[in-house]
Amino acid sequence: MVCPFCRYPVKKNAGNIRRHHFVHMPGATCSVSYETLLHEGAKVYLHRCLERGEPVDIFIDTITLRPSKTRRLLESLGVRRFSTSSKSVFKNDGATHLLERVIAGKVKPDVVSYGEYVAGGERDIFAWEIFVTHEVEEEKAELLRINRVPYIELSPIEEGPNSYIYTMKSHDGISFIDDDAIFDETVYRDNKADLLATFEKEMTQEVLKPKLEDARKSWEAAADKSTEQELERRIVLKVGEITIKDAMAMAQAVSASPVVIFPVTNIPTGSGLIDDRWVKVETVGCEKYNGKYLVKLNERLYFSSGLGMLRGIYDELAKMGVLKGVTAKEEGRDKIIFVGVKLALPLVERRGIVECSSILYKYTDHPTEEVIMWETRNKKSKTSGKYYMLVNDDIFVDSYEWQLKNILYNLLRFTTIEAHLGLNADKKYRVDALKISGLVQVEKVKDTLLAAMTRPSVVP
């Protein structure tokens, strides 16, 4: 007996401890590896089983299947691996199976299966490849595809003396995997008990789940209705407790008691406002004086601090919830700057809300974004020494004088504005406060109502 690789004599070891095997006679230089022996043994074993018509178990990992209904079903049932048979892979009982037969001109699979001849002299051809260290080369796989020869690549594991089990490594052209018939023919038959048990469990959950969900919704609806009814009862009781003083406070807030706004940088005390120095604002404009724009009221009145006045207006109206900031990208740059505001004015006379925009003219056609304002502040330029304004996270306020003029113009359209005149260091009148009438004091209404509704109840 000789070695099939080096043709050197071998002898059989058939002891009682180790598995029976062949070894080279002394003097042999054969260096065949275990991987080569595994490949050859698995190939010969597969061929022998095919020739005898004996089914070979093939394990298939679900992830190796192409996307299909079968794969989705198996994965949803938690099936990660299942077994099938070589008879399901190549269904031809009268086939001929040959070792390393050349097909398609120059392709030599490990095992080739030929089906019976059919009309026209054609035969089904199927290729079996054994994977140990090298997978099917791309060139070989391409030739098999071009010649329409389906194949399967199997990774072998020794199960016992001269016996192997196989795991599918890859495949191509096997229709039973692609058309989902594998479930009907093999998976269900071989895993019937497990699949039925899993299906029964999943189906029970599917039936119970919507019923439980409906019950939960019904309970929540009943609970919500009960809570709503209790809340309504308590509100009715609380409304009955509202005093004349509460009602007068709300009426005063709704009838729009004036909002007095001071410049943030120059806030006078309340006693500093002299009654006979309030004048009604009729017009607002912006003019250039000594290289600087100044906002002018009634053609003759200027602000003691235009920058501080803008900050005061923005802060107060933002706090009232009637103002949101507007930002845009600076022209020619990606820098975000503050370009104006959007107003939602709750007006007493109109008994409704008027919305309008106060945005710098050069940005009216630019993409803009609304922002909630929570902070304004001044900063002095290190180069020019002039003060400028920032909003929120250091967003630069462009052309604050024109923004002051624009928002006052919009407020004049819908409300009554009065300016308080204070004397500056040169004994000249300057506007040091503004009084806006006609806006519903929403926050005061809320505060009054909240105070009335949260007082300890005397009614059980």
Image (cartoon, rainbow, N blue to C red):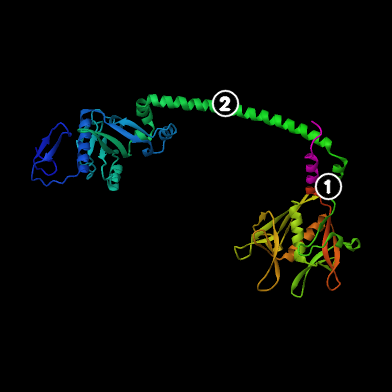
Q: Is residue 100 visible?
A: no
Q: Residues within 10 Å of mark 1 (few under 14, many from 20)?
A: many
- Residue 218: image quadrant is top right
In the displayed structure image, the side of residue 198 where residue 218 appears, left or right: right
Specify the quadrant that holds the N terminus.
Answer: top left
Q: Which mark is residue 254?
A: 1
Q: Secondary structure at mark 1?
A: helix
Residue at 30% from the left image edge and 47% from the top image edge: 138
Q: Is residue 235 visible?
A: yes
**Can you say whether 160 is above or below 408 in the image?**
above
Q: Residues at badges 2 and 1 in contact (C-beta under 8 Å)?
A: no
- Point out residue 55 in the picture as x, y percentages from the top left corner: 26, 29
Q: Secondary structure at mark 2?
A: helix
In the displayed structure image, the side of residue 160 where residue 364 appears, left or right: right
Q: Which mark is residue 125?
A: none
Q: Nearer the viewer, residue 205 or 237?
A: 237
Residue at 22% from the left image edge and 45% from the top image edge: 106
Q: Amino acid at mark 2?
A: Lys
Q: Magenta span has 93?
A: no
Distance between the Cα atoms at labels 2 and 1? 51 Å
- Point out residue 200 in the picture as x, y percentages from the top left corner: 46, 24
Q: Magenta span has 459?
A: yes
- Total number of numbered discs in the rendering: 2
Bounds of the magenta span?
445-460
Q: Residues within 10 Å of mark 2 (few under 14, many from 20)?
A: few
Residue that mark 2 sits on: 211
The single residue placed furthest to the right in the displayed view is: 276
Q: Nearer the viewer, residue 50 or 234?
A: 234
Of the image marks 2 and 1, the number of the one nearer the N terminus? 2
Q: Amino acid at mark 1?
A: Val
- Point out residue 391 in the picture as x, y percentages from the top left corner: 68, 60
Specify the quadrant that holds the C terminus.
Answer: top right
